[in-house]
Amino acid sequence: MGKLSGANTIAAIIVVVNGLLAEAILYWRDSNFFKTKLLFIISPLIVLITSHIAGYYIYQIPVSKDNLQPLKVGIIQGNIPNEIKLFSEGWRKAIAGYTSGYQRLAKQNVDVVLTPETALPFYWSDILNGSSFYQAVIKNKVPAWVGANGRDGKSYTNSIFTLTGEGETYSRYDKYKLVPLGEYIPFESIVGKIIDRLSPLNAHLAAGKPNQVFDTPFGRAIIAICYESAFPHHFLRQAQAGGEFIITASNNAHYSKTMPAQHHAHDVMRAIENDRWAARATNTGYSAIVDPHGNTLWISQIDKYAIHANTIYRRQNKTLYVRWGDWLTPTLLLLSGLSVILGIKN
């Protein structure tokens, strides 16, 4: 049902069913008319059953692979705890783990390798300056989407770079939706000078531009880094701009096992809404491959190093949601307003 008007379609159905159920209970206590009581009681059941039938019908439409270009994606889950990630032990483990994982995936004839958010916690220019990962790419000629830090003036960015098999930087995406208090301070423009006086850091994390597109040698992608998975419009805008598949990169090492499962559920919903295949790479789990119906075709174990190769497909078709966005919410607001106006007049 999310293909119709996004996640708010499901929210609207939940509200309608529970609202009708509440009205039925109230009416059952206050009315003496059995037939009317029965109508009120079965109305939420009718909505519930009808919505499930409609959703099941949409779900039964085959995920066609005909005339679509396959893309064999290799995923590396580095499993580097945050406690060591930004220290020499973590740096050595990152370089070793992602280099060896890349080499193993290249031997499986993948088209591209996807790494998590800040998989290599260095500035991009330093990675290109002869790192073992860069040398492995030059040798094996398989492109990679690499999580690293970019420069933005005196600040730095949380970015994903497309590195071609020839060692060239093809494209770059900078994380746009930063985590409040975790990645930026709200009202920093006001309190920034005070923070700078107290902070020993010379640079701050800068947000990317809101209108970025991410072109790759395999077509335009819909891309998100970690927290951005919770923002449907971020994916919708990129789908409307021609994104043909979804790639997400996350860390998730900060949290308990519950949060990575919720995060995975966000990306499942984004795949459904936009009718796109999705590849997820995380640091500690859950990495996954998701089809346009929301089926998880592969998911990693949590807190384990993992590599995996699977095929996703480029798609250009547009769901009702991609064409019109969240059209249901303003429609319901309009109908609610009209009902209030008519109620006042009567």
Image (spheres, rainbow, N blue to C red):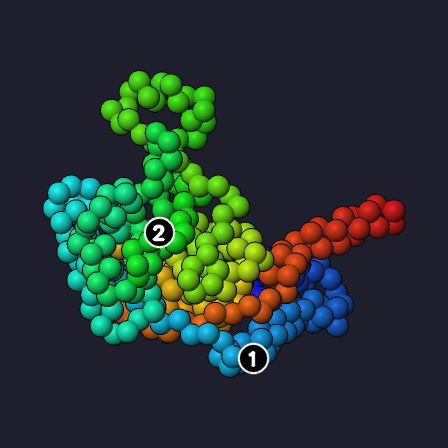
The answer to whether 236 is drawn above or below residue 178 in the figure is below
Viewer-proximal residue among 185 and 128: 128
Q: Give the alpha-carbon distance from disc 2 to disc 1, as whole Å.
A: 39 Å
- Circle 2 residues within 10 Å: few <14, some 14–19, many ≥20: some
Within the image, what quadrant is residue 104 found in?
Answer: bottom left
Asked if residue 302 can be seen in this view, the reply is no
Viewer-nearest of discs 2 and 1 = 2
The answer to whether 85 is drawn above or below residue 292 in the figure is above
Task: Answer left or right for 200 relative to 57.
Answer: left
Give coordinates of residue 160: x percent, y percent: 36, 51
Q: Quadrant of the N terminus?
A: bottom right
Which residue is at 25% across, 48% downward? Answer: 128
Asked if residue 150 can be seen in this view, the reply is yes
Which residue is at 46% across, 56% downward? Answer: 215
The answer to whether 101 is drawn above or below residue 67 in the figure is above
The residue type indicated by label 1 comes to Ile
Give coordinates of residue 162: x percent, y percent: 36, 55
Give coordinates of residue 92: x percent, y percent: 13, 49
Viewer-proximal residue among 182 and 255: 182
Which residue is at 25% across, 69% downward? Answer: 106
Residue assigned mark 2: 169
Residue assigned mark 1: 61
Q: Secondary structure at mark 1?
A: loop
Mark 2 vs 1, N-terminal side: 1
Viewer-proximal residue among 181 and 37: 181
Viewer-proximal residue among 144 and 201: 144
The residue type indicated by label 2 comes to Thr
Q: Secondary structure at mark 2?
A: strand
Within the image, what quadrant is residue 180 found in?
Answer: top left
Task: Answer left or right for 120 relative to 329.
Answer: left
Hey, which residue is sitting farthest right in the picture?
345
Which residue is at 33% across, 53% downward? Answer: 168
